[in-house]
Image: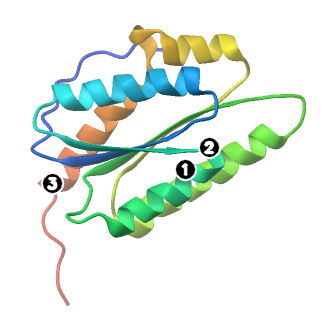
Amino acid sequence: MLKPVTAKNIPAANGRFAIVASIYNDRYVDAMVNEAHAELRASGGVNVIVVRVPGAFEIPLAAAELAKRSSPPLSAIICLGVILRGKTAHADLIGEAVTRALMELQIAQGVPVIHEVLLLKNEKQARERCLKGKYNRGREAAQTALAMAALLRALPPARKG
């Protein structure tokens, strides 16, 4: 069931965020990027880096490099893309590979990686999830990034030794 995105008002606490988004299916992805960026700005005092890659398959590499190279470290990385199923298994293979890579990345790097690379049946689903503000998954991804950044800030420091 498609749930509307509601306002959360999570403060950014001067966090640094990255949005990695595919250019492929740009009509839908651009709408998610715009909503995510607006949500992060509305949270106050946020530094946002936007990186565009050719397609969904390239998102994990760009996210990994951002996680490794960013100084100071990023508070979270938001990954946005739209994969539309066709008549072959290609979309499913891409979706599965991206999902696995993003999960492994966040665990290895210790930075929240928000996965909103949508694997959808058709353009109707893309319009509902990307173009309608009430259901925009870019906004939802930004809220998740803000919540995870706040959670990690609140955790006790790592033990040494």
**Mark 3 to mark 2 CA distance (whole Å):** 29 Å
Q: Nearer the viewer, mark 3 or mark 2?
A: 2
- Badge 2 is on which residue? 56
- Badge 1 is on which residue? 59
Image position of 115 with respect to 158: above or below:
above
Give residue 70's mark: none
Residue 124 in the figure: left or right of residue 67: right
Residue 96 in the figure: left or right of residue 18: right
The quadrant holding residue 108 is bottom left
- Badge 3 is on which residue? 153
Mark 1 Cα shell of 10 Å, populated few (<14), some (14-19), many (≥20): many
Q: How many numbered discs?
A: 3
The answer to whether the residue labelled 2 contacts the one labelled 1, judged by CB atoms less than 8 Å apart, is yes
Viewer can see residue 70: yes
Residue 8 in the figure: left or right of residue 23: left
Looking at numbered disc 2 in the image, what kind of residue is underneath it?
Ala
Q: Secondary structure at mark 2?
A: helix
The quadrant holding residue 19 is top left
Name which of mark 3 and mark 2 comes first in the sequence.
Answer: 2
Looking at numbered disc 1 in the image, what kind of residue is underneath it?
Ile
Q: Secondary structure at mark 3?
A: helix
Looking at numbered disc 3 in the image, what kind of residue is underneath it?
Arg
Name which of mark 3 and mark 1 comes first in the sequence.
Answer: 1
- The x and y percentages for residue 43 are 16, 30
